[in-house]
Amino acid sequence: DAKTTQPTSMDCAEGRAANLPCNHSTISGNEYVYWYRQIHSQGPQYIIHGLKNNETNEMASLIITEDRKSSTLILPHATLRDTAVYYCIVRVKTSYDKVIFGPGTSLSVIP
Amino acid sequence: GAVVSQHPSWVICKSGTSVKIECRSLDFQATTMFWYRQFPKQSLMLMATSNEGSKATYEQGVEKDKFLINHASLTLSTLTVTSAHPEDSSFYICSASRPGQSNQPQHFGDGTRLSIL
């Protein structure tokens, strides 16, 4: 299973873009990169996922490098409500489709 | 809106009692659901995979007789913490994904906070 590496914590000023990096150098060709976040005392929330092309939705953008060994989640205009732990996950390709969480990045959006 | 619902959201009970937590998929049928446990300031730890109509698959180190999982219908999985003790106090979270393509994301419930006195 491909593993991911994320910074433990990051700060971002309110209104600025938050760029959260993730390394997944052992990702295999058919594995997707998923991002979830967990706001304190809530269940994780799905944000976005991608295979090799950059993706954008109403919440965020996902930039995946051409070699797919790393990716960046971009929150274009961070708000205080974006303060959360962000998890970058490479999908385990088993018949059970398990999601294995690493420690994630604790993002603090500062007023 | 929410697509996976958990109940209860919070429970406090005495040591030695059993506690049942429900996980429902609201607008889709889920043949597979997952149960996680999360201790304070830690990440989610996968406990088991709940399979509709068959036995659950437990992760290494998780006691199957302690954490009973039943997936009796395509929209409901239950986790029963038997003879709960204070060390079982934790945040329990379930998830499920819509059937279809294998790259569907997991949707998570809002979690159940269990406190054993």
Image: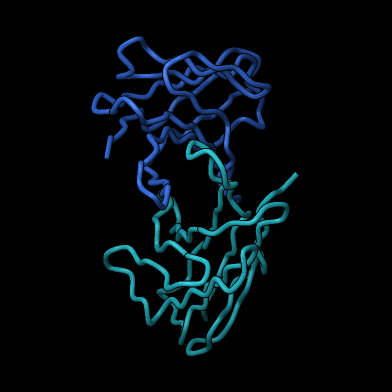
Chain colours: A blue, B cyan
Q: Is residue A44 left or right of residue B65?
A: right
Farthest residue, direction bottom: B16
Left or right: residue A84 compared with residue A25: right
x 40%, y 57%: residue: B46
From the viewer's perspective, is A68 left or right of B112? left
**Pick the front one: B3 or A13:** B3
| Total numbered badges shown on the rendered structure | 0
Quadrant of residue A14 within the rendered picture:
top right
In this view, which residue lies farthest toward the left? A26
Picture quarter containing residue A84?
top right
| Residue at the far top in the pictured view | A66
Give coordinates of residue B70: x percent, y percent. Answer: 52, 75
Estimate the x, y position of residue A22 in percent, counting from the top left.
37, 24
In the rendered image, residue A18, in percent from the top left (x then y), is placed at: 53, 18
Work out whether A102 lies above or below A66: below
Of the pair A18 and B26, the residue shown nearer to us: B26
Q: Residue at x 55, y 42 (%)?
A: A38
Residue at horizontal 42 percent and vertical 73 percent from the top: B55
Is A29 situated above or below A42? above
Q: Is residue A35 above or below residue A96?
A: above
Q: Which residue is at 54% across, 37% downward?
A: A37
Q: Nearer the viewer, residue B7 or B26?
A: B26
Screen quadrant of the N terminus of chain B: top right
Question: What x and y, as percent, mark residue B76?
Answer: 63, 67
